[in-house]
Amino acid sequence: MVPAYNEAENLPILVSEIRKALSPASLTYEILLVDDASTDASPGVMDRLAAANDYVRVIRHERNLGQSAALATAFERIRAPVVITLDANLQNDPDDIPRLLDQLEDCDVVCGIRAKRQDKRSRNSVFWGGGRWRRSGLRWARGSSLVRY
């Protein structure tokens, strides 16, 4: 599932990269694009991708609700037993999907971590601090680390 807001240029690339990453595995899959009320050409691009590819489906928000709401909408409408989320900004590599799926044999949940973010420094520091706090709280609550190396 891919939440998207004003990602017209990235969407065709992302859909193509997902297809290339999953084709060798001969998997049945669906790409669920959630348009979070984009104001650029994203809605038309999504419609063309869905028309050209039977594995692409589009859901639209009437107003911009944010990434969390877009993910919640997608989780409500997803059809598959396994769900992978990707950002539409091309910072998640679809080539990692088969590796994530392989890890599901031993786990109920698999999470990838971007080691080299491409966000602005101010955004990185906000997320680093918030993520550090959340991980600390979760480690304390669970009594263990969440990251398996």
Image (spheres, rainbow, N blue to C red):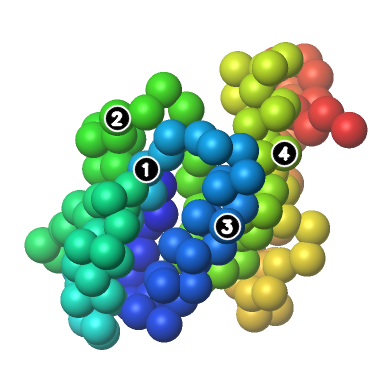
Between the residue at mark 2 and the residue at mark 4, the CA separation in whole angstroms equals 22 Å
Is there CB contact under 8 Å for labels 2 and 3?
Answer: no
Q: Which residue is mark 2?
A: 79
The amino acid pointed to by label 4 is Arg
Q: Amino acid at mark 3?
A: Lys
Can you tell which mark lies on residue 99? 4
- Where residue 83 appears, as percent x and y from the top left, is 46, 34
Question: Is 26 left, or right, of 74 in this rendering?
Answer: right
Instruction: Identify the residue under disc 1.
Output: 30
Assess whether mark 4 and mark 1 are in contact (beta carbons under 8 angstroms).
no
Please tell me in which quadrant of the rendered image residue 29 appears: top left
First in sequence: mark 1 vs mark 2: 1
The residue nearer to you, when weighing 148 against 129, is 148
Q: Going 55% across and 63% down the picture, which residue do you hit?
A: 17
Q: Is residue 109 left or right of residue 51?
A: right
What residue is disc 3 on? Answer: 20
Circle 2: residue type = Arg
Q: Nearer the viewer's eye, disc 2 or disc 3?
A: 3
Cβ–Cβ under 8 Å for marks 2 and 4? no
Q: CA distance from mark 4 to mark 3?
A: 14 Å
